[in-house]
Image (cartoon, coloured by chain):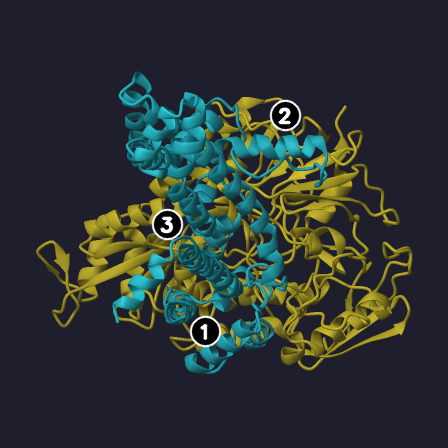
Amino acid sequence: MTASSPFPLSRRTLIKSAGVAAATSAVGLSFGSMPASAQDDLVICNMVCESGASFTKNFNPFAPTSRWVARNCIYEPLMIYNYAQGVLEPWLATEYSWSEDLMTLTMPLRTDVTWSDGETFTADDVVFTFELMQQYPALVNSASGAWDDYLASVSAPDPNTVEFTFSRVYTPALYLITNQRIVPRHIWETIEDPVTTTNENPIGTGPFSEIAVFQPQGYEIHKNPTYWAPIAIDGLRFQAYTGNDQIAAATTSGQIDWGGLVANPDQTFVAKDPEHNNYWWPSTSNVCLFMNTTRAPFDDPKFRHAIGPALNREQMVQTALWGKSVAANATGLSDSAFAEWIDPEVVEAGKDWVTFDVDYANQLLDEAGYARDGDWRTMPDGSEMKFQAIVPGGYTDWVAVLQIAITNLKEVGIQVELNTTSPDAWSTSTYTGDFDISLGSGVRGATPFDFYRATMSETTSKPVGEVTTQNFHRYVNADADQLLLDFAGTGDVEVQKEIASELQGIFASEYPIVPLYAQPDWGLYTTKRITGFPNADDPYAPLGNNSTWPTVLIVFRHLQPAG
Amino acid sequence: MPFLVRRLVFYLVAAWSAITINFFLPRTMPGDPATSLFARQTSMLQPEQLDSLKAAYGLTGGSLWDQYVTYLQHISRLEFGVSISQFPVPVVDVIRQGVVWTLVLGLVSLFLGFLVGTSLGVICAWKRDGWLDSTLPVLFMFVGSFPYFFLALLAVYVLGVQTGWFPQGYAYEFGLTQGWNMPFLRSVAWHLVLPATSVILVSIGHWLMGMRNTMIAVLAEDYLTMAEAKGLTQFHILLRYAARNAILPSVTALGLGIGFIFSGQVLTEIVFAYPGLGYLLFQSVTSLDYPLMQAIFLMIALGVLLANFLIDLVYVLIDPRTLRSQNQAH
């Protein structure tokens, strides 16, 4: 039921490093020696996945504050949505099947999986995990909220099969249920409070489970001795970087084997060692301009329509992303991520909305009754029109994009003031609906369902003053809601595609948010010590390491020591 | 002892004000911690779950007044709760990580600054108007009046980033075993050089001038002429008669300095990314971690109050006139 953004943490964490990477590499920084490993002969992959100057021991996969490895290395899901390939890869479960009436989901499980303490993994552990989520609503993981929404029961007809029974037909739940990380019953049933436990000695099914070194400054996790698939590297190391400049410095000086974002990577990173260094930024969703539709004139679709052609998307891509992205189409869906879902007719019909054309924008605004009085336009009743655009000051790319948007809007007589805030103040303002204009990434799910649910559905909207993280522009369309219900009520992909076309049509004629450009899924690597990372030539899995789905688990199997 | 009672009442009122401000100040900041936590988990959380999450994190406390009363009760039992940004780790554990490094950095730079500064002060006063006396005080007063953050940033940029001679952050190198072993201690010392030197540089002027001026006053005293008349060596007079008497105000300042370690180093730790309390405070403010923020602010405030109170006590013991003069006022 949740729609999902691929970068819950990474945007916040990594984008801030962009400006600094250029600066630090320009002064020829060296960042001391390589950190020592627990044992020197091991092949350890150095990763940057989370921010923070000091780490505390927390491997609770249900806690929003736990270490990255809890959800991406130690505990595994039933299946992994590989968004680079667009397929649901079998993991602890080998396949899934829906009953005829779409009310039961059955999954056979692997039989060769053991927990890292040697106990056998069975369907009972899966049942236990979901029941734990039911008992403690404050546990945060993929199936959070499932019981209140669509799940009726979970059972194990035999030790290697698990069966989910639904309270209503809701096929998008497949991606939520399969993504739930599974914990062992024999450990967690003895834990007094699963919400507040820090789970310091984790027992999981994942490829890495042994905490070899743990200090506030960093930690190292080694291979699970009983893992059910071959893994060629010995462990992973995470250092607590005190700031984004340190992350950028460590990355550009070659200490990070697998990282996220550095500014202008062709010059700051690849040029340093073209033979080994590489990055891959496939797009997954679009950065969009959000306008608060509870306020005038943003409640007027004609006004929202006119904003589209006023914006210079090419310049935004050049300025904020070093030219490494493309302008968005009118469906709001990313071209590369949803190629088989996008309706070319809608794209064609909506072209006027997403193509830079100042005269056309002026014409639309004049027709809609926002007359120009000197430099600035006024509301139809003649009152002053002036807005504030908010963005976190640290998101340098977004600040640059909004500055361009403000200049563009000035051209067509709309007065906007830029207001940079702290990330916390920004999220509070946008999520509670206390803003005029804001920026955000479109929600990225396995199907377009999540994006349209987040932009046009009543289920994701809240009254101003209450928190919603998805439909914070607060646009609701009854037709779209019906289509979304139909979409969730069928398991036939062809039918879903037809419904998705209609949703695209509504989106491109109601203009709930204004798509700007494709948001890359940051990822970079160096092959000096470790090879086998996915890239544009071999896109077997995403390179990004902070997605909703633990796609890193797929990558770990492909990694090999270099040479 | 009406004087001490009055001082005690004063400190209690001051402590209560600090505790109260400590509660209300963070809550006037924009944003709230549950929403920012929520923001990081948008892919997994349903809006309906926010309430369960708030309850689990102890962020539902009824009215502000109720929260305040609960807060006072917890403080009186020295319970600081769990950190929000590093939930569910207790605040006490998070602080324990930082307090060691703050003490290491604080004590090392305080004592070294005191030692070097006062020694130079003694020399300057003894060789009054010599070449040292005409250069050192001016030099260190100049360095000391420099904006500190500028000096610190300059040090990080030149000695850390550009030349790479010194580490740019942390208290020791990752991977070393913590404890009393040589590689670890060497690494700790190495990481201390930049932050400690920056603090010492700006504090030397203060110690130097304080010591020099008192020394000069002491040197004019009759008992020094007497000592000289007795035929004592110059060195003996310098240390046993002059410096020993002149150092008293500096020792008082040193004691006060210890109380200010927690508060005085916030900037140093942020600039040098040194993982002490100041750096934790910075992090807790940016992540709206109320419980952590409150506990650190409280430590800082109480540290200053305690230091002041101890100085009051010491004054009473050293100089009985303090008591009398205060009483005569009534």
Residue at the outermost front position: B230
Q: Mark 2 packing: few (<14 Cα in 10 Å), some, or many (20+)?
A: some
Q: Which residue is mark 2?
A: A276
What amino acid is at disc 3?
Answer: Gly
Asked if residue A333 lies left or right of residue A276, the reply is: left
Chain B: its colour in the image is: cyan
- Residue A461 is marked as 1
Question: Gap in Å between the C-alphas at discs 1 and 3?
Answer: 26 Å
Pick the front one: A196 or A394: A196
Percent of width and height locating residue B208: 36, 32
Camera-nearest label, 3 or 2? 3
Chain A: its colour in the image is: yellow
Q: On the rendered image, what quadrant is the C terminus of chain A found in?
A: top right
What amino acid is at disc 1?
Answer: Ser
- Residue A393 is marked as 3
What amino acid is at disc 2?
Answer: His
Helix, strand or loop under label 2:
loop
**For marks 2 and 1 on the same chain, the one whose residue lies earlier in the sequence:** 2
Q: Mark 1 packing: few (<14 Cα in 10 Å), some, or many (20+)?
A: many
Query: Pointer 1 indicates a residue of which chain?
Result: A
Q: Quadrant of residue A448?
A: bottom right
Percent of width and height locating residue A368: 21, 66
Residue at 80% x, 57% y: name it.
A204
Query: Pointer 2 indicates a residue of which chain?
Result: A
Q: Quadrant of residue A170?
A: bottom right
Q: Are marks 2 and 1 on the same chain?
A: yes
**For marks 1 and 3 on the same chain, the one whose residue lies earlier in the sequence:** 3
Pick the front one: A8 or A333: A8
Percent of width and height locating residue B171: 58, 39
